[in-house]
Image (cartoon, rainbow, N blue to C red):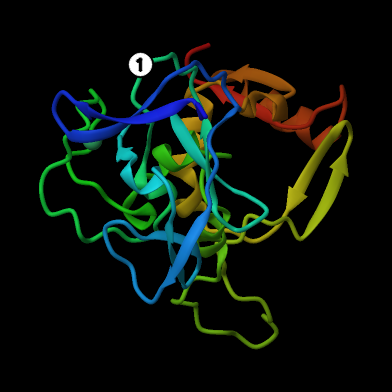
Amino acid sequence: MNDGYELQRTDAKGEGVLATRSFQVGKTAMVGVIDRELDHNHSHASQVGEKRFVLHSGLIPKVNHSCEPNCGIRLNASGAHDLIARRPITAGQEITFDYAMRNYSVDHFAAHCQCGSPRCRDRITGWKDLPAERKAEYHGFVAPYLTDIDNQPATEQPPRRRGCRRSLTRSRRPARIGRVKELEFAIGLCSVHYELPALIALTRAGRITPEVALSHRFALSEGPAAYELFDSRADGVRKVLLDPAR
Ligand SMILES: [Zn+2]
């Protein structure tokens, strides 16, 4: 049976798994099946939970890492990893994913990464060492327990003050949904510094547009009028930007 992929020798990296047909974005290139549980992490181990490691059967353990992969990870109903195309894949292309999409920590690849991508980060690292911009790019294509770990309360918590019952967390889960004028927004606690790199990357990529919060722009010299407008709540004012370039 032709599954749509096969093991072949690749130019630079030894064996690799190559597509034998095309896969559109979002399609399952390889279906994961767990062969057996492992009691620790190693170079062929797939992390399938915060503290669970398994060996996949078939060719998935042979799929090479890339720092610019054409596939991502999706946990299937059996708890194994399916490889999902995040870019169009044509027949003859090597199927790759970023090992950081699967394992929180990767310590066993001492040599330099040989993926050959212009965006190669030189060392094969786990999710915990992945830059925030890359995490944002991989959104939707990583194993869910990795983002769950990120969302857990930070271990370093600020000292509690009397009357302050909540500790600072990295949670992205909104505590509640608010609505002011036509803006709906999520309210929650998060570390601004932790979230900023991902937000900057998403803004640069045009995936989020913070400008929707702005209702008015003024030159710096118009500051007093801007404050008066904001104070009066007139003209549907929401957020005012004082723009030095105006
Ligand atoms: Zn690389």
- Tell me residue 15's x, y (percent): 22, 35
Q: Residue at x 51, y 46 (%)?
A: 142
- Tell me residue 34's x, y (percent): 51, 58
* Between 21 and 143, the one nearer to me in the picture: 21
Q: Which residue is mark 1?
A: 92
Ligand 1 falls in quadrant: top left
* Between 67 and 30, the one nearer to me in the picture: 30
* Quarter-of-image position of residue 167: bottom right
- Is 153 placed left or right of 234 in the picture? left
- Tell me residue 116's x, y (percent): 19, 26
Q: Amino acid at mark 1?
A: Gly
Q: Residue at x 30, y 40 (%)?
A: 65
* Between 222 and 96, the one nearer to me in the picture: 96
Against 106, residue 2 (above or below) is: above
- Is 129 placed left or right of 82 in the picture? left
Against 8, residue 245 (above or below) is: above
Q: Residue furthest top?
A: 246
Q: Residue at x 52, y 38 (%)?
A: 199
Q: Residue furthest front?
A: 1
Q: Residue furthest left?
A: 111
* Quarter-of-image position of residue 24: top right
